[in-house]
Image (cartoon, rainbow, N blue to C red):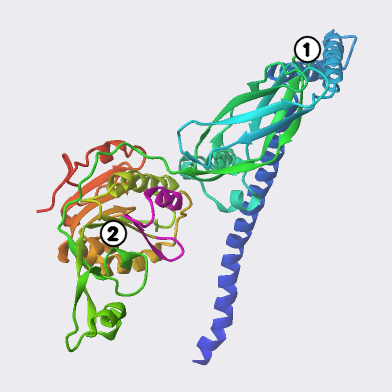
Amino acid sequence: MQQRSADAPEAVRHRRQSERPRGLAARAGRWLKAWSWLNLRLASSSQEWLRRHFTPAGQGVLAATFAAGLFGLDTRLTAAHQAFAFGLVLLGVAWLGTLVPLAKLRSHRRPPSRAAVGAPCRYKVEVANTGGRIARGLTLHERLPDPRPSRAAFVDTRAPVEATLNPFERLLGYPRWEWLIRQTRRAEAPAPVQLPDLAPGSVAELTLALTPTRRGWLTLDALVLGRVDPLGLMRRERVVAASARCLVLPKRYPTPQLRPPGRRRLQPGGIEQTSSVGDSREFIGLRDYLPGDSPRHIHWAAWARCGEPVVKEYRDEFFSRQALVLDTCPAAGADPVRFETAVSAAASLIAPLGEQPNGPDGLLDLLLYAEGTRVLTAGRGLMSTAAMLEVLACVEPQPAAAFTHLAETVSSRAARQSACLCVLLHWDDARRGLVARLRRSGLAVTVLVVNEQGEQDDPAAAGGAFIAVDARDPAPALARLSPDWSLHGAHRAA
């Protein structure tokens, strides 16, 4: 024991020495990533400054002038200094042209309240000339938010493409920079729109268009008025309208009109119970009081008229109620495209399921986990399917362990559902168990699993209709849904 105690500090010392290089390597790697981020940030800032102040022709003249200045340092050997001087004169004249003040304009944009990913979003902009001279040669465009990643995001994030790169490319970090910009860019930059000539006091209405690329809130930083100098080399810009924003809904794919299977189920409390607390079954009439009736059901006005106790009579309600379960708990390190495809698939199914399924009294429940299990119900007098899409527009990935809470909620509500359609991110033991429990409760369950190319899932284990949805192209899989929730060409459980 004494020998072991004496050797213990020595073992600890050796272990710390072996771990020290690894810690130094990690710190050096983070420092190099931060250095790469700083260089890429500076290069991107310079590129953005050139884009705002120079036209493409002006950028070409600027580059040629700079190159001529480098090669023309010795005026006795080359004549490049003459090209350098000529370029400086052109840029100087162009700069003087940008000093002319822009016309006084007042603008008012009317951005839409909602847009959709991948669909062109057009809106009107009203421009009025409030100055005393004619406004000529002006353009108008929207300035979008800066998509460049922060230092923390660049250092801590690993792009999927980095697995195929060599160490030098990973060290430079440019592929990671491009990948992060694509992830944070929310819309394609629209081209400037040419303004017509505006006389003093005149008003013009223009149509601007942009295409959102990500769901969620899209912020329009500013509406910018611009003008190019007479030589067409430099630009002058001015912000004429403050920021605005609109909600971008998830991308939706064509799906057939669905008639969910399953029979009507007893709904304790009726339709009102879905949005309120308490027993509120359907009222059908009055009858005489019988021993054992609840005093809460006494109709006092009828008792006063008849002189005898009268109670209200109710009956239980049976109607169709479908469940759409969205898995929002991806595994650690999963490709974000998989999650976005699952959200788009659920959004594509909401409209076909929510348009009065199985009659005017049918209800649609959307179950998902978003900082807690949420159950959203659409139907008569309740939430609309458009409101459901707005919720899906802002949902974010949740911890993988949170799927247990979602599964418990779905299982506890199985007795009230007529059918269930599950959009899952993986096909593991936890999700197999959920589908099996739903099948044992008598539900007609259809399973859509979003997977990557090359992944193999076991359709026989789904316990019902099963289809694999390609994360890169979900449209063919969604089109295979038939109106009765069966799947054309899909796997069926034995």
Residue highlighted by disc 1: 231
What's the amino acid at mark 2?
Answer: Asp
Q: Sequence-wise, which precedes: disc 1 or disc 2?
A: 1
Is residue 366 inside the magenta stretch?
Answer: no
Q: Is residue 183 left or right of residue 423?
A: right
Q: Quadrant of residue 19?
A: bottom right
The residue positioned 70% from the left and 44% from the top of the image is 38
Q: Does 443 sit above or below residue 108?
A: below
Q: How many marks?
A: 2
Please give the range of residues in magenta. 369-392
Instruction: For mark 2, give the secondary structure.
Output: loop
Quickly name the residue at label 2: 428
- Give the amino acid type for the residue marked by disc 1 in the picture: Leu
Compared to residue 385, the image places residue 272 above or below, namely below
User: Could you tell me residue 227's position as x and y percent?
Assistant: 74, 21
Task: Tell me where residue 22 appears, x and y as whole percent.
Answer: 58, 60
The image shows residue 390 at horizontal and vertical percentages of 45, 49
Q: Name the one closer to the observer, 215 or 67.
A: 215
Q: Is residue 420 above or below residue 306?
A: above
- Res. 203 mark: none
Q: Is residue 416 left or right of residue 276?
A: left
The residue that appears at 25% across and 37% down in the rendered structure is: 479
Q: Does the magenta portion include 385?
A: yes
Alpha-carbon span between mark 1 and mark 2 = 64 Å
